[in-house]
Amino acid sequence: MQTLDLISEWNRCKVVLAEHEEWYRKVRISRDGAPEICSDESAKIEPLIRMALNLYVSGTAEDRETIRSFFSSTDRCHIHLFRVLAQTVREFETLPSESNFKNSLAAMSLENIRFDYRDSYMLLGRLYLTAVRKSIDPDPLLQWIASISDTRPVYAGQSSMQQFFSEFKNSTFFRESVAHTVPRHETAANHTMKADEK
């Protein structure tokens, strides 16, 4: 997609999302609390979230920062983004493919660990194990998503999204919750590769 086309698509998408965010803030104040997400709301907003993900992946670093900054400033739209992230993980587990894996990674990258890094670890662990079990090499895709993710920590003392992806296999979570459940043939293959490299 050409840069001008991408910007135009994002602007159209952003207008609807921004209007929805404004609606949510007004309703939250008037009702003294957040309304539950209904099916009509999901049907309206979540396809736009998926469109934003496509634009996020296909754009330039500047485009990605623009899209990332928008979602970081939202509440309701960010909740929808996390819902889409969870949906893409389930889609990958149901129909494993490199394309579906990349969709999930893109959603996780854009979500940028704003909710809870523990949720992000759990979801990425599920993705990693599904990929390995279905003979999809997750490592190049983790490197790819790290290369387009935010380099700045969202919160002080926390790793950036780029570090989260690039250092996932060195994390305590991976060692304690993922490594021992990786299929044996994959572990053996890794040992063989390392031996060949020596």
Image (cartoon, rainbow, N blue to C red):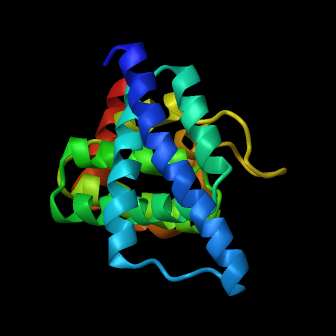
Q: Looking at the image, is 145 positioned above or below residue 72? A: above
Residue 68 appears in the picture as rendered: yes
The residue at the point 66 percent across, 76 percent down is: 28
Q: Looking at the image, is 80 positioned above or below residue 156? A: below
Quadrant (top left/top right/bottom left/bottom right) for the N terminus: top left
Query: How many numbered discs?
Result: 0
Q: Position of residue 120 (x, y in %)?
A: 53, 61
**In this picture, residue 151 sits left or right of residue 195:** right
The image quarter containing residue 99 is top left
The residue at the point 50 percent across, 43 percent down is: 15
Q: Position of residue 107 (x, y in %)?
A: 44, 49
The residue at the point 47 percent across, 63 percent down is: 80
Quadrant (top left/top right/bottom left/bottom right) for the C terminus: top left
Q: Looking at the image, is 22 positioned above or below residue 135? A: below
The image quarter containing residue 162 is top right
Q: Position of residue 192 (x, y in %)?
A: 29, 39
The residue at the point 53 percent across, 65 percent down is: 79
Q: Position of residue 92 (x, y in %)?
A: 24, 58
* Extreme-bottom residue of the structure: 32
Q: Looking at the image, is 93 positioned above or below residue 71? A: below
Residue 169 appears in the picture as rendered: no
Which one is nearer the viewer's eye here, 92 or 58? 58
**In this picture, residue 12 sits left or right of residue 102:** right
